[in-house]
Amino acid sequence: MYDFIVLADWLEFAVRWLHVITAIAWIGSSFYFIALDLGLHRDRNLESGADGEEWQVHGGGFYHIQKYLVAPEKMPGDLIWFKWESYATWLSGFALLCLVYYLGADLYLVDPNVLDIPVWQAILISLASLAVGWLIYDTLCKSKLGESPTTLMVLLYIILVALAWFYTQVFSGRAALLHLGAITATIMSANVFMVIIPNQKVVVADLIAGRTPDPKYGKIAKLRSTHNNYLTLPVIFMMLSNHYPLAFATENNWLIASLVFLMGVTIRHWFNTQHARAGSPTWTWIATVLLFLLIAWLSTAPLFRAEAEGEAKLSHTAQRFAAAGDFEEVESIVLGRCSMCHASEPFFEGIPWAPKGVILETREQIATQAREIYLQAGVSHAMPPANASFIEPAERAKIVAWYRGVTRGDG
């Protein structure tokens, strides 16, 4: 029978690939239209009645683009709606959340050393936070605060900081930052699905019916689009953060996440200003560099303080792997072949810290990383790289037998 774990890993890879592709399409089209809108020449009296125009060259051809504030005199029949990029990105991202963090909750979602809760409770908190987060955001945007964009943005930032802290008190560090990205991406996609597209459809329907569209629909959509513009870069950082333990596996991870949102604002402000031909605000890059240096310092600051010693708590799944009859043999293999790099203080030349933050020095750590050890050093030969520690085929086979014995109930 084909190994379910291997099949699940390939399924995760396929969904991740799809998610990246759709995200590129969504972010690419979003950034393009933002740059286009800001760069339009609006100082020209166009016969077509358009609000502005721009000439562009790409792929050996020239493009003449015009923007209508409401619509042209005659509504085109082949109007293209840019919405499926957003929907596909969220759907594939949610599928990936289910595959990695819900099905692998014992390893990636729940950390007993943070909060020892059942898997079902963690998943329920995850789902509820995505829904409640959108409802709070949507309510604030529809309140009188929507008429004061700057005040609203400051309040939303405070809420994001609170969410960053909340997630780090409930989930593993990796899952906390990922969820902060997920709730932000949910808000962005819901903006498209629940507000921007419906408002545009109202305007189109009015035009087709010969009515004058209410300008409030465009104003509301513009507010949500602006939020999406400034949230995009932090979301990308959060999605990438699970590959970088210096971002998620420190006690300052919630502060790091909070500062990343500020970096997203400073970077996007520079691009927006440039596209609008309003100058080049150098201060934004100075601010971004200073924020990044502060983040880098925060990621290592705990290393300068002694940490409390104590035995790590094991999830139910990890306990099964540690209790297996052949665990001591596997532990000996891992300590002999892997721990020279995967240690709190690696002694393998050229390795300053444990790759991906994975430390394999104790039985608790080895049992917790059972799935990755199986995939990286058992099924595949990814670890150690270039077989630097000369792990033998028989040792890989022992790792495979140990993992499969536990998952199939033989261990």
Image: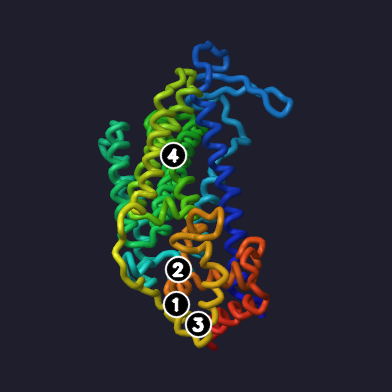
Kindly report the distance in space between the C-alpha atoms of the residues bearing marks 1 and 4: 39 Å
Name the foreground residue: 72 vs 11: 11
Residue 52 appears at what percent x and percent y? Answer: 53, 19
Quadrant of the image for the N terminus?
A: bottom right
| First reached walking from the N terminus: tag 2 or tag 3 | 2
Name the foreground residue: 77 vs 148: 148
Residue at the spot x=42%, y=74% of the render? Answer: 364
Are the residues at dot 2 and dot 1 in contact (C-beta closer than 8 Å)? Answer: yes
Question: Image quadrant of residue 148?
Answer: top left
| First reached walking from the N terminus: tag 1 or tag 4 | 4
Callout 1 amino acid = Thr
Q: Residues within 10 Å of mark 2 (few under 14, many from 20)?
A: many
* Left or right: 202 in relation to 163: right
Q: Nearer the viewer, mark 1 or mark 4?
A: 1
* Left or right: 101 in relation to 313: right
Callout 4 amino acid = Asn
Residue under pointer 4: 228
| First reached walking from the N terminus: tag 4 or tag 2 | 2
Callout 2 amino acid = Leu
Q: Nearer the viewer, mark 2 or mark 3?
A: 3
Residue at the spot x=35%, y=70% of the render? Answer: 112
Which label belongs to residue 107?
A: 2
Secondary structure of the residue carrying tag 4 is: helix
Kindly report the distance in space between the C-alpha atoms of the residues bearing marks 4 and 2: 32 Å
Kindly report the distance in space between the C-alpha atoms of the residues bearing marks 1 and 3: 17 Å
Secondary structure of the residue carrying tag 3 is: helix
Residue 321 appears at what percent x and percent y? Answer: 48, 80
